[in-house]
């Protein structure tokens, strides 16, 4: 059973999500809260598999709450999905950087919400290749020159190559095809890179790839 916590300051939004999620045989809503501080408290008490987190809430907002959950080692298995009104909210990239596993626009189709919960619960990032490219392109265009970093020194050359491809938005199957590897081998390389870099999921690998210059935005040439 996938256990979900809802964090949104709008009661009607929570009620709609609760009804949809609880109608599924493999998903249950274990709680709902109206602000980020409550979300963190309940996450620590209940250890849900997934937190659907509104990014804009009064008091402690979703970004601050995501940062606290991401920094808490006891919550390493709690996956945050950011809920936003706009698909490229200015805070989304920062939320991914501090530990969110992906994001959803609030008016997403019900079937997509259910799929998202299941994808994130099994430890995958909620970033399709298309969404990854679009998200990164938008924010990279506003960024400065990537900073020099020794962060990547822990990786082998193959792992750096893999992280770069993740940063470009490729799935494990696409990486395997590009490098002539088996999908299982590609997945193993991705997992090892995540462990070495302390990344919670693929979303953070994408951020690392751009911040360190492994992948260069088109505007840098």
Image (cartoon, grey):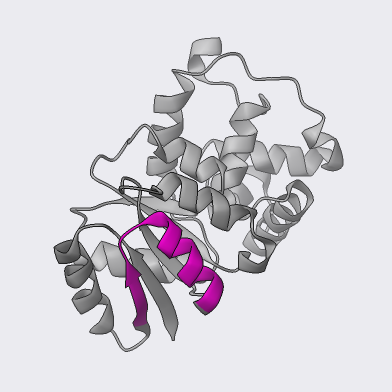
Nearest the viewer among 6 and 181 is 6
Does residue 140 appear left or right of residue 76 in this picture? left
**How many circles with numbers are drawn on the protein?**
0
Nearest the viewer among 105 and 189 is 105
Nearest the viewer among 103 and 209 is 103
In which quadrant of the rendered image does the N terminus lie? bottom left
Does residue 82 appear left or right of residue 99 in this picture? left
Nearest the viewer among 183 and 133 is 133
Residue extent of the magenta highlight: 28-45
User: x, y (%) of residue 29?
Assistant: 34, 79
User: x, y (%) of residue 207?
Assistant: 57, 37
| Point 32% across, 71% down: residue | 32
| Point 60% across, 39% down: residue | 165
In the picture as drawn, the residue positioned furthest to the left comes out as: 12
In which quadrant of the rendered image does the C terminus lie? top right
Is residue 3 located in the magenta-colored stretch of the structure? no
Rendered position, 35 above or below 147: below
Rendered position, 102 above or below 5: above
| Point 54% across, 47% down: residue | 203
User: x, y (%) of residue 63?
Assistant: 44, 45
Does residue 180 appear left or right of residue 24 in this picture? right
In the picture as drawn, the residue positioned furthest to the bottom comes out as: 25
Task: Tell me if I can see residue 51 in this picture.
Answer: yes
| Point 67% across, 64% down: residue | 184
User: x, y (%) of residue 186?
Assistant: 67, 55
Task: Tell me if I can see residue 128 in this picture.
Answer: no
Residue 216, quarter of picture? top right
């Amino acid at each position: 059973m996938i256990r979900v916590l809802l964090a949104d300051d709008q009661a009607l939004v929570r009620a709609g999500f609760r009804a949809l999620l609880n109608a599924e045989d493999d998903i249950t809503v274990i709680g709902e809260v109206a602000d980020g501080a409550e979300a963190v408290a309940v996450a620590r008490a209940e250890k849900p598999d997934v937190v659907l987190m509104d990014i804009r809430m009064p008091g402690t907002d979703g970004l601050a709450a995501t940062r606290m959950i991401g920094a808490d080692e006891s919550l390493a298995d709690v996956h945050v999905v950011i809920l936003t009104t706009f698909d490229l909210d200015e805070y989304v990239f920062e939320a991914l950087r501090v530990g969110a596993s992906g994001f959803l626009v609030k008016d997403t189709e019900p079937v997509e919400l259910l799929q998202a919960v299941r994808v994130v619960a099994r430890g995958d990032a909620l970033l399709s290749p298309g969404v990854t490219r679009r998200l990164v392109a938008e924010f990279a265009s506003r960024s400065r020159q990537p900073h020099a970093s020794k962060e990547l020194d822990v990786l082998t050359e193959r792992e750096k190559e893999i992280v770069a491809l993740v940063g470009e938005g490729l799935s494990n199957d696409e990486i395997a095809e590009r490098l002539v590897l088996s999908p299982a081998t590609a997945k193993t390389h991705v997992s090892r890179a995540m462990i070495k870099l302390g990344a919670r999921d693929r979303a953070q690998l994408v951020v690392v790839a751009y911040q360190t210059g492994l992948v260069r935005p088109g505007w840098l040439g």
